[in-house]
Amino acid sequence: MLTVGKDALQVERQLKAGLLECPGCGGRLAPWGYARSRLVFGVGKIAWRLRPRRARCAGCAASHVLLPVSVLLRRRDAVAVIGSALLAVASGMGCGQVARRLGRAVATVRGWVGRFAGRAEQVRQIFTVLAVELQGELPVGAAGPPVADAVAAIAAAMQAVRDRWAAAVTTLSRWEMVCAITRGTLLAPSIMTGPINTNHILS
């Protein structure tokens, strides 16, 4: 599973031109049909139908689904919605209040938070390492519950990314960058990360 840029037409052009690399072996990805379409729900009442592109590596023959940075793997809600819920819970808001604020079911919000909480330490480590690599110093953590610490590490790393590549990442939100860096797997059973550079984040 590979997370790529926001513009589907741009991704299609890059895919056909052989500019996208396999995350497994680094080989060239080529078009290979489409994955099942699904409805994605954004902030408020915004919704759109997503038909993810499939690609196959010319080197190792592995297949990948190309997701835009606006969505996480196997989630019907946009990463902006899920991220805002995690941020609100990290600040002390209850899941019920967050659900009402976002117009989502309480069980849905609890599911996001529960999955994130179960890997909060891993998330904190991933984004703390990224912040240190880019800034050269250890960011000050939240020193609170695991979810709050993980969200604080994300915030520090995303600020470091913006400081390093300000002009290049202005079109992406914090949570879209998180989605790109984790290849859409932030709430998946296993979190993946890739090389952190503008080609990976913005391709």
Image: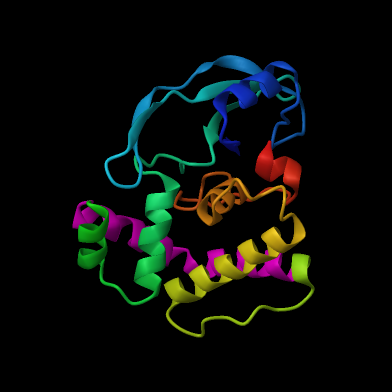
From the image, give the main secondary structure of the stretch colored magenta. Answer: helix
The residue at 24%/60% (across/down) is 101
Query: In the displayed structure, would residue 70 be above or below residue 163?
Result: above
Q: Is residue 115 magenta?
A: yes
User: Which residue is at a point 56% across and 26% down the rendered structure image?
Assistant: 8
Image colouring:
rainbow
Residue 55, magenta (yes or no): no
Whether residue 92 sits left or right of residue 52 in the image: it is left
Answer left or right for 120 relative to 133. left
Q: Can you name the residue that lies furthest to the bottom here?
A: 143
Q: Locate residue 98, reporting x and y percent.
A: 27, 63
Q: Is residue 128 left or right of residue 96?
A: right
Q: Residue furthest right?
A: 136
Q: Residue at x 43, y 57 (%)?
A: 83
Q: At 77% across and 27% down in the image, what residue appears?
A: 27
Q: Residue 188's spot in the image, x, y percent?
A: 46, 49
Quadrant for the N terminus in the image: top right
Magenta span of residues: 104-132
Q: Position of residue 154 (x, y in %)?
A: 56, 65
- Please, is residue 198 above or below residue 49 in the view? below
Q: Quarter of the image holding residue 9? A: top right
